[in-house]
Image: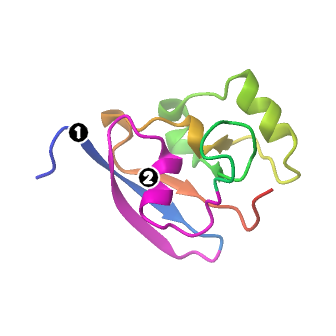
Amino acid sequence: MRGHNVANVTFIQFSGEETTVDGTIGDSVMKIATDNLVPGIDADCGGECSCATCHVLIPEVWLEKVGIAREQENSMLDLNPDRQDNSRLSCQIELTNDLDGLVVNIPEFQY
């Protein structure tokens, strides 16, 4: 059994390939992806919310738990031509115990 400081996240590539990894509570979903070499999360700015290269799509069942984007994140997402209603920047999603089992979809392209 995992400790209380670990939760898993499943990343689904545009191709449908799934990667499930354990992450540390308190880390961003972006950091978890880059630490585990999950393809498709470029994270060019290193998690500073100054680009949109860690764009993910949150399935509807997770939207409420993940929460809504703040103003700075929305500004970055507005620059993304593939933005959808369920778009988030993974650098702005902090892993919590409530997000254990989180599923995120990675779009075909990062901008």
Q: How many marks?
A: 2
Hey, which quadrant is residue 12 in on the image?
bottom right
Q: Residue at x 71, y 32 (%)?
A: 73
- Viewed as shown, does residue 1 lie left or right of 91? left
- Element marked by disc 1: loop
Placement of the C terminus among the 4 image quadrants: bottom right
Residues in magenta?
15-42
Hey, which quadrant is residue 70 in on the image?
top right
Please report whichever mark, 1 or 2, sits nearer to the chain's N-terminal start: 1
Give x and y (percent) for residue 10. Answer: 43, 59
Front one among 79 and 97? 79
Give x and y (percent) for residue 96. Answer: 36, 34
Crowd around label 1: few <14 · some 14–19 · many ≥20 (10 Å): few
Query: Residue extending furthest top?
Result: 71
Label annotation for residue 32: 2
Hey, which quadrant is residue 78 in on the image?
top right
On screen, 58 above or below 49?
Answer: below
Q: Residue at x 65, y 42 (%)?
A: 89
Residue that mark 1 sits on: 5
